[in-house]
Image (tube, rainbow, N blue to C red):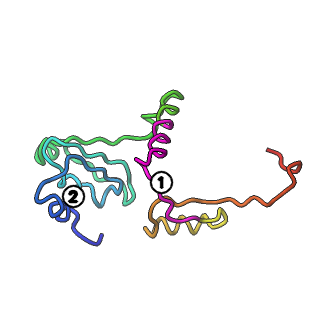
Amino acid sequence: TRQDFVAEVKRIMDGAKLPVVYDSVGKDTFLKSLDCLRARRLMVSYGNASGPPDPIAPALLAQKGSLFLTRPTLFSYIATREELEQSAAELFDMVRSGKVKVEIGQRFALKDAAEAHRQLEARKTTGWAVLTVCIARLPFSALRL
């Protein structure tokens, strides 16, 4: 919202376009995201933060360079227990190795969940927003799990 990201991509890439674009915003960025792609490359549309993108004609993808477009959902990739466990193992391996970094940008007490939602909706968060629960110290015999 602060700058023309198509122009910024051009600037950073010395006039070149990108081999892949991941768009989690949706409606507000969809067409401009396509404009950032090299010919015959892939755009992954995986979110609707600004609402779902408007429908497009397949001819638009041809006009912009024979582009590929996909709209994956997590559940298509973890449809079986085996796929879920394999994906989770790969993710945790990447986190352990440092290839994927988990950045917790803010924490909210569970009682402040409504405020957490307001912050998310207002785009005032970065990284992961985590809800925390504080369990009072009780004698072990009092816990019923």
Query: CA–CA distance between discs 2 and 1?
Result: 28 Å
Q: Amino acid at mark 1?
A: Val
Question: Which residues make up the magenta segment?
Answer: 88-107
Residue at the image point whose x is 23% and y is 55% from the top? 33
Q: Position of residue 73 (x, y in %)?
A: 41, 41
Q: Quadrant of the N terminus?
A: bottom left
Q: Position of residue 88 (x, y in %)?
A: 50, 38
For label 2, count other residues whose C-alpha is less than 10 Å away and answer few (under 14), some (14-19) or many (20+): some
Mark count? 2
**What label does residue 32 carry, if any?**
2
Residue at the image point whose x is 30% and y is 45% from the top? 44
SS at circle 1: loop
Residue at the image point whose x is 35% and y is 57% from the top? 25
Q: Quadrant of the C terminus?
A: top right
Circle 1 residue: 102
* In the image, residue 103 lies in the stretch drawn in magenta: yes
Q: Quadrant of residue 81?
A: top right
Of residues 22 and 87, the one drawn nearer to the viewer in this rendering: 87
Q: Amino acid at mark 2?
A: Lys
Q: Position of residue 105 (x, y in %)?
A: 49, 64
